Image: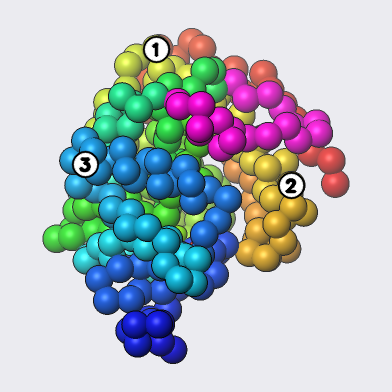
Amino acid sequence: MTTDADEVEEPLAGGDVTEGVVRVGDTVRRPVSGASESVRLVLEHLESVEFEGAPRFHGIDVKDRDILDFIDGEVAGRPWPAWVADPEHIASVARLVRAFDDAMEPLGVPARANGLRQGDIPRIPDSIAGAPTLIAHLDVTPENVVFRAGRAAALIDFDMIRPATRAEEVANLLLWWGGWMPEADREAASRNLDPIEAGALIVDTYGLDDAVRTTLVELSINVADRSWFLMKSRAEAFGGGWQRMWDEGVGDRTIRRAQWLRENANDLQRAVASDVSMVNPTSCRTAWPR
Ligand SMILES: Nc1ncnc2c1ncn2[C@@H]1O[C@H](COP(=O)(O)OP(=O)(O)OP(=O)(O)O)[C@@H](O)[C@H]1O
Ligand SMILES: [Mg+2]
């Protein structure tokens, strides 16, 4: 396959949703999506504050694709490599995401980013996250982090960015890097991860205020409860990879995750918060329609 400039296109396999991501020389081309305009806003902001842990945006090519830097390094494919459960790797992800959020915070939540807010979905439980303070990444899966010399060097794939709180960002880290889901639903590489140890490591390394730490377990339950509705509505609205994920049981996995979080709420709360009194795992019990 070649482009207009006769450059070789090398397919990049990774996530579940975006098809047609390719490498061309030292750039990546991604089909323009609904999030592209906001991704551009975010990447241009990161460039202006000289944040090094994200690709630069270089415009749109003749095939209507975003042009981004290709970032050299190692990205986990499936099956995940064993190092996704290595504490040094995990801590480095928490540090990188902290730096990303620190770099994003001064931008705040510009009106142009309002379109990224999660829309209303019938019967979805309300979010308990509170008012957004920054545009967060919220999809920090191993497939979306570039590592160099065993340390997280850059975030890629900004399709899930939206106005959110730091606690929501950390809850996403706990899900992907802390093993906060039933063991049987984890990728093999993170099956032996201790969610208590990994959870404490992530939260300590990111460095959240005590008051925010006490909200993380309940927030994670709320995120899991909402996720069932969000995933279902994306499958219905967009089909493609979203429908594939739904058919493969992502909805049932989020239900099991919410149940696991409720069952382990007290232990998890002790791991991430000094004040254990606030956890109320039954406070937002949800009935998932079938
Ligand atoms: N800027 C980049 N630098 C280096 N590698 C990249 C870059 N962008 C993408 N890749 C590689 O291509 C893979 C797929 O890219 P990306 O994550 O952007 O799309 P996707 O995962 O298919 O989309 P989605 O997560 O929305 O389903 C990544 O997992 C990574 O290996
Ligand atoms: Mg991806």
Whole-percent x and y of residue 81? 34, 67
Q: Earlier in the sequence, mark 1 or mark 3?
A: 3
Query: Residue 54: in sight, yes or no?
Result: yes
Q: Image quadrant of residue 148?
A: bottom left
Q: In the rendered image, which residue does mark 2 sit on?
A: 233
Q: Nearer the viewer, mark 1 or mark 3?
A: 3
Q: Residue at x 40, y 41 (%)?
A: 41
What amino acid does circle 2 point to? Answer: Ser
Residue 268, visible in the rendered structure? no
Between circles 2 and 3, the one closer to the viewer is 3
Q: Is residue 116 magenta?
A: yes
Tag 1's secondary structure? helix
- Residue at horizontal 50%, vertical 56%? 186
Residue position for label 1 = 211
- Mark 1 to mark 2: distance in Å? 33 Å
Q: Nearer the viewer, mark 1 or mark 2?
A: 2
> Is the residue 131 above or below the residue 52 in the image?
above
The residue wearing badge 3 is: 51
Indicate the amino acid at tag 3.
Phe
For the residues bearing labels 1 and 3, Cβ distance under 8 angstroms: no
The quarter of the displayed image where residue 145 is located: bottom left
The residues colored magenta run: 109-128
Q: Is residue 98 left or right of residue 272?
A: left
Q: Position of residue 21 (x, y in %)?
A: 45, 70
Q: Secondary structure at mark 2?
A: helix
**Structural distance between the alpha carbons of marks 2 and 3:** 34 Å
Q: Residue 144 or 23: which is nearer the viewer? A: 23
Task: Say left or right for 69 vs 199.
Answer: left
The answer to whether mark 2 is within 8 Å of ligand 1 is no
Chosen colour scheme? rainbow
Mark 1: amino acid: Ala
Does residue 215 belong to the magenta stretch? no
